[in-house]
Structures are given as structure tokens and as C-alpha cells.
Amino acid sequence: MCGIFGIVVEQEQPLGETLIEAGRRLSYRGYDSVGCATLRDDGTIDLRKDVGKIEKVAERLAFAEMVGQRGIVQLRWATFGAPSQTNAQPHLDSDGDLVGAHNGNVVNNVELREQFIAEGMTVRSTNDGESCVHAVERYVDRGHDMIEAIRRAYQDLEGDYAFVIGRAGDDRLYAIKKGSGLVAGLLDGAACVSSDLPSILPLTRRILRVRDGEIVILRAGGVELRRVEDGNIIEREVEEITDSMESVEKGGYPHFMLKEIHEQPQVAGELIRLLEAASYVSPMVERMATARHLYLVGCGTSYHACLLGAIYLARLAGRPAIPVLAPQFIAQYGPALGPEDVGVFVSQSGETKDVLNGIRVARERGTGILGLVNVLGSTLMNESERYLPLACGYEISVPATKTFTNQAVAFLFLALRMGGHPTADLAHLPDLLEETLAAVEPQVAALEPALVRQDDLYCLGYGLTYPIALEGALKLKEVTYAHCEGMLSTEFKHGPLSAVYDGYPVIFVAGPEDVPLLISGINETTCRGGRAIVIGEEDPRLRTNAHDLIVLPQAGPLLNPLLATLPLQLLSYRLSLARGYDPDFPRNLSKTLTVD
Ligand code: M6R
């Protein structure tokens, strides 16, 4: 969790604006607190940090004024230690001549803290990031140089993390990767390192991807990689990133969430074209088709895509697949897994710890590991025998939108191929998505006043729209903080119907094949005074029975769920704003959950 960025330049200069901008671009990784440290030529360290989002803290603590020859910024998503000024990162060592920050988790930090205190070090916080600094301090104090001290600290620090650290009087920064993302950037006369590319790309397109067990040494003139195991230098080719910067900007939209919702027609089209041309689809299909048991594994939104994927596979290819939440995959199927089985692990970030735990168990049992992943170079990608890229570009907003659509598109494509069906019809999907966005935006806006103060609602679907109802409910919860329960429509009468009172809103996601069945559910709600809001294709039966009908373009049962997702995303976005929240950064959450 969290985001780190460090930069080294030739000589002391203003670094504050660079650090603020880098931090701003990493704020999707955590926004409980933020801190900046600069290391100055006179051997002093200027450290400023506090609780809150970067814009506010930077202004309050005048980050812009900070100067130095090296600088570090950290965005925190709290796991160990409450969000507080003391627990904010970066942290100093006992004497104040080392400063560092981490992302991820040091799981043995409580034991380490006791050791550090017993050894006479000054420990100020309960945050695990501070453990990284003292773990290095321990060996620097015993006379080791920084590289050797970091190598030894690595042995002491358990967990998945990356950290960056600098020492007063040195002219370098050092970073290390163990399980969390880390990328280095090369600039003329400078070098930088970060948890992720958005903070690096405005500065340089020349990057080095760091792997687990590697130390990065940043000098003003370049970047050196060393293996933690033996300290030897690693040769790695510099990669040139060609993605447009616009993909990491808001592109004129007020929020990333809205931008990413509107990118769906484009990214779906790109993925469909990519899969049509890709040589890796057939071996993936073959592996899935011939597995004894096929598991589709993910969390949150990615799990909802698995639910939809299982329906597509059964319906189009006659292939049974078991969709399962990643932690439950371990408990429910782990002991029964075998080498004949295959798991398709689905994760936007490719770093979700719950998913990686599932992969570990699958690996131990010899089970095949396939991936659907958006972040290339992620752990999921590296752990997979084969993977399909989701090709969505960066998804910055915490609520997943475009990655859900492309996860669903990828499953639909795989199911069509497995069943021997043509995929040509998918070419219409981008236009249908575009048409849907244009059609539903005013309809969703019209619904906003009725729902804005509603703290409790249901979202129901059936068959192919059941996963969409769950996904819609998750999105509504995530960004509006209202309670919204997603459910199979037929289950509603088995208990929750008792919650219905006059005006109580129940959203129904109606697939074109299931209208007769949904009509019953709608009436069970409306006859008790409930407000039935239906999302579906134009249909007189829906029109007469529902209170509100959000009309989708006619697309048939297979594409309908993809279209039905869009009004739920837009409704969540609008309600979030109307309730005074920031949909890009819902409270208490983080984009990448690298913790148990
Ligand atoms: O990166 P992942 O796809 O593995 O993330 C899984 C969930 O944390 C994620 O989908 C989460 O539910 C979304 N923020 C919901 O919008």
C-alpha cells in the first residue's frame, strides 16, 4: 500500500514542486497522510509531514519551498499505526541522518520495534515504514556502507514492501523492492524512483523496471541495480515508455472516475482488436478448456467479472467454471486443488494480496495459473503461465470502471472462442457503449434528486445481470457511502422484501431474456409501496410495471450486461458528488490492496 517517490539531482535546488507533483500523481495509492523530505548540501534533512491529502498538507506545510539535492515524498494508506502526524512518512532514524519511506507492509514490525528499542534506537511511531529506516540504521551503526546495510536489512524485514532511503552527507538515494511495485526513471543529470509510472512519466520516458530482491542506487548521473543476494551489479536495458501523458491526466473531465467511465468504448474496442490479433488467446483457451476444474478467482469488482465470465463460459462453450472470491478459493478449494486444475486469476492491479495468496496456494498444489491483468509487469503477470492484458491503460480512480468492462469483454471473447463462435459481432460493442453513455446520462441525472438522500437501497439482477447488480451495488456503496445490497432478484422475496416501505428504492437490472421473471419481482416491490427503478431495454412490460425505466440500446442478452453497467457507474458518480464526496478517492480505501 502507499506510494513513494524519490529524486536525486546534481546540486541543491528547489525540489518542492517536483515532489508535490509526484505525490499528487500517486495519491490514488493512499491519502491518509503525506510527507516530504529533502536532503540538503549542508547535511541537514528538512522533513515535513501531516495527516490529510497532498493538496492541503502541501499548502499548510509549504512543501513548495523545500530545497535539496535529494527528495522523497510518501503518500500513506494506513495499515500499521493510525493515520497521524507521527505515523506519517518519511521517517528519520535515531540521529536524524537517515530518512526513508516505504510502501507495502513489514509484517514483523512489532517485533522489530522491540528489538530496535532494546538496542537503544529512538523509535517514534507505530508505523512499519519506520522499521525500514531503523533496519538500515542498525547496520550503518555497525560500520557497513549503505548498500551492505540495506542488504542486511532486507533479511530482517518480513513482508511485501518497497522502500527508498537517503543518508545525510551522501549524494545518492537507495531503494529496494520486495513484493511491492518499484520503477526507476532516468533523466539528464537526475534519477528518480517510484511505486508507479504516473509520477515518473512527466519527468522522463526512460525507465528501468525493478524486480524483487533488487537494490536501486540513484545518482544524479544514472541508476545502478544490484542484486540483494550477492550485491552484484545487474545489467538491464532501459525501457522507453511511449504511452501518452494524457492517459494519466484527467483529459478535461472533473474526475478520473468520469474520464474512465467515458473511456470504456475506446478501451473495449482496443481490447477486442488486440485479442482478435493475438497469438496468445488460443493457448489460453486450450488450457481453460482442458482443465479438470476451472476456477475464476478475484476480489471486489474483479470477482464480479469472474461471476459474469462463468456464465459466458457455460453458455457459450458448455464449460463449467467456478467463480470464487480469492480468500475463499484457498479455504474452499485449496485442499482439493491438483495439477489438472486451472485458476484464472483476475486483478486490475495484479498486486492484490488476497489474489496473490490464492496464487501461492495454486502454485503449491501444481495448479495451472492464468491471469487477466491490467498492470503489465505486475506480480500477477509475472506469476502467470499465460496472461491476457486488459489493455485499459492506467485506471487512477479508486472505483474500478473501465477495467471491469474489459475483464468482462475478455471473458466473453474467451468463451466465444472456446465455443467455436465468431467474435466479429463484438466489433459493435464500442458503438453500443458510446450510444449507451449518451442515452443514459440524462436519465440518470433525472433520477438523482430521488436518490441523493437515500442511505439504504437494493440492486437486483438475474442470470447474466446478477453480477451487474452486485457490481452496481459495490460501486454505489464505495463512492456514496450509502448501504446498497446487490442480490439475485429471486432471493429478495426470501427475506429482504420485509425492508420495503413507501418510496423505498429497489434497482432492477433487467436482461432482455428475463423480463417476465423480473416483472414478478418488480411487482412484489411496488405493491408494497417500493419504488422500482429498472435498467433494461425498451419494453412495454417494464414501462408499465416500473416506476422508472432507464432505457438501454437493444444489444441482445450477451452484451446487455456490459451496457447495463454504465448507468450504475454514472449513478454512483453523480450521487457521490451530490452527497459531497470525492468519487476518485473514497474514504478508507486504496486502489491497490496489497494487504491481507
Ligand atoms: O486490483 P484488483 O482488481 O485485484 O482489485 C480488487 C478490488 O480491490 C477492486 O476491484 C475494488 O473492489 C474496486 N475498487 C471496486 O471499485
Image (tube, rainbow, N blue to C red):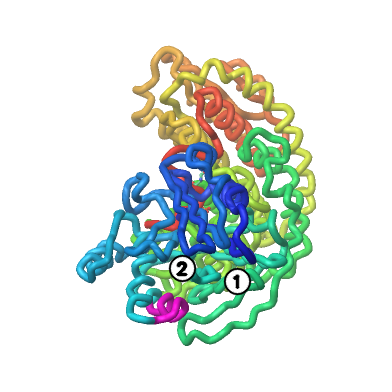
Q: Secondary structure at mark 1?
A: strand
Q: Is residue 435 visible?
A: yes
Q: Position of residue 426 (x, y in %)?
A: 75, 49
Q: Is residue 322 left or right of residue 258?
A: left
Q: Is residue 32 above or below residue 6?
A: above
- Cα distance between the residues tagged 2 and 1: 13 Å
Q: Secondary structure at mark 2?
A: strand
Q: Residue furthest front?
A: 42
User: Is the stretch drawn in magenta largely helix, strand or loop?
Assistant: helix
Q: Position of residue 102 (x, y in %)?
A: 44, 60
Q: Residue at x 56, y 39 (%)?
A: 584
Does the segment drawn in magenta span residue 150?
yes
Q: Position of residue 589 (x, y in %)?
A: 45, 44
Q: Is residue 407 visible?
A: no
Q: Residues within 10 Å of mark 1 (few under 14, many from 20)?
A: many
Residue type at mark 2? Arg
The magenta span reads 144-152
> Residue 167 shows which numbered tag?
2
Residue type at mark 1? Arg
Pointer 2 or 1: first along the chain: 2
Q: Are marks 2 and 1 in contact (CB under 8 Å)?
A: no
Quarter placement of the N terminus? bottom left
Quarter placement of the C terminus? bottom left
Q: Residue at x 50, y 65 (%)?
A: 343
> Residue 47 shows which numbered tag?
none
| Res 103 quadrant in image | bottom left
Q: Nearer the viewer, residue 196 or 188?
A: 188
Does the segment drawn in magenta span residue 29?
no
Q: Nearer the viewer, residue 217 or 549?
A: 217
Q: Is residue 217 above or below residue 268?
A: below
Q: Position of residue 302 (x, y in %)?
A: 53, 51
Q: Which residue is mark 1?
A: 219
